[in-house]
Image (tube, rainbow, N blue to C red):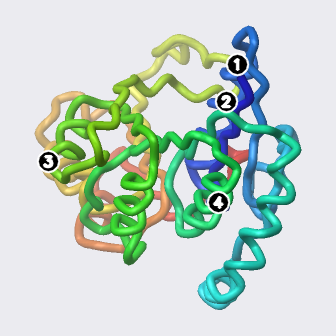
Amino acid sequence: MRLLVWQWGRRGAGPKFAVELATALCRLPGVECTLSLSSGAEILSGPRPPRCDLPVVTYSGIFELAMRVLTAPAIVAGLVRRLRPLRLDVAICAMPGPLDMLLVVALRRLGAKILVIVHDADAHPGDGVPGLMWLQRRLARMSDGLVTLSQATAARLRQQGLPRGGRPILVLSHPPFHFGPVPAPPFRHGGGARLLFFGRLLAYKGLDLLAGAWPLLDAASSAEIRVVGQGPEDEALATLRTLPGVTVENRWVAEDEI
């Protein structure tokens, strides 16, 4: 079976998820897997870049995104030329993004089946990508099947009438990412508890609950918590910065630093 895994985001978990998925699929007997990433993906510029079989020029800002949309017919024709020699059976979208419809049109011309992995059926509070859920639903309607990482997301997609025509939803679990050697067991350092929050600093993450709960814990007097990620400055972060044992680093963490 000949597979394509694609994810055309530039930063964050999307490209990493695609790399891990393609790596795992390549280990299966009888499977040939091609990986397509944005040529500007941060993961490709790190010290240990993965193999990317089909790099695609995407965009680095709203102007370049608009130009890609305006030149869509030429981009689709180019994708068809590059993909035809692969004779793909199935293409898997590892995480939806703004330009995926261009590839879907090319794949349809080539007769490949399309699966879309849906991580969230609705936008999170604080997410700032306008129109992404609308694009995701269009992508889901054009797919031959959907994959989710929880029963809750699958149930919500069915409420939205997705996918169309009785096509299947496959529910899997999200395995841990591989970032290198496993760290030492907890408390090997011989001190108090050390906790880490790592990810986007957005409202739905519950940082306001952490700020309210931390002073109530007896362990807070000897424990440390490190909050690391990127997001808008708000009252929850300001409160966390005033608490003993808490440090907040509001910044983007590059792939090779994780």
Q: Pointer 2: what residue?
A: 179
Say what secondary structure mark 1 lies in.
loop
- In front: label 3 or label 1: 3
Question: In the image, what residue occupies the spot 69% across and 31% down?
Answer: 22
Of the two numbered discs 4 and 2 in the rendering, the one whose residue sits closer to the viewer: 4
Element class at badge 3? helix
User: Which label belongs to residue 159?
Assistant: 3
- At mark 4, the secondary structure is helix
Residue at 70% x, 50% y is 110
- Cα gap from disc 4 to disc 3, whole angstroms: 27 Å
Name the amino acid type tagged 3. Gln
Which numbered circle lies on residue 181? 1
For the residue pair 214 and 114, the one nearer the viewer reads as 114
Disc 2 to disc 1, C-alpha distance: 7 Å
Q: Is residue 172 above or below residue 96?
A: above
Q: CA distance from mark 4 to mark 2?
A: 29 Å
Of the two numbered discs 2 and 3 on the same chain, state the one appearing first in sequence: 3
| C-alpha gap between disc 1 and disc 4 | 36 Å
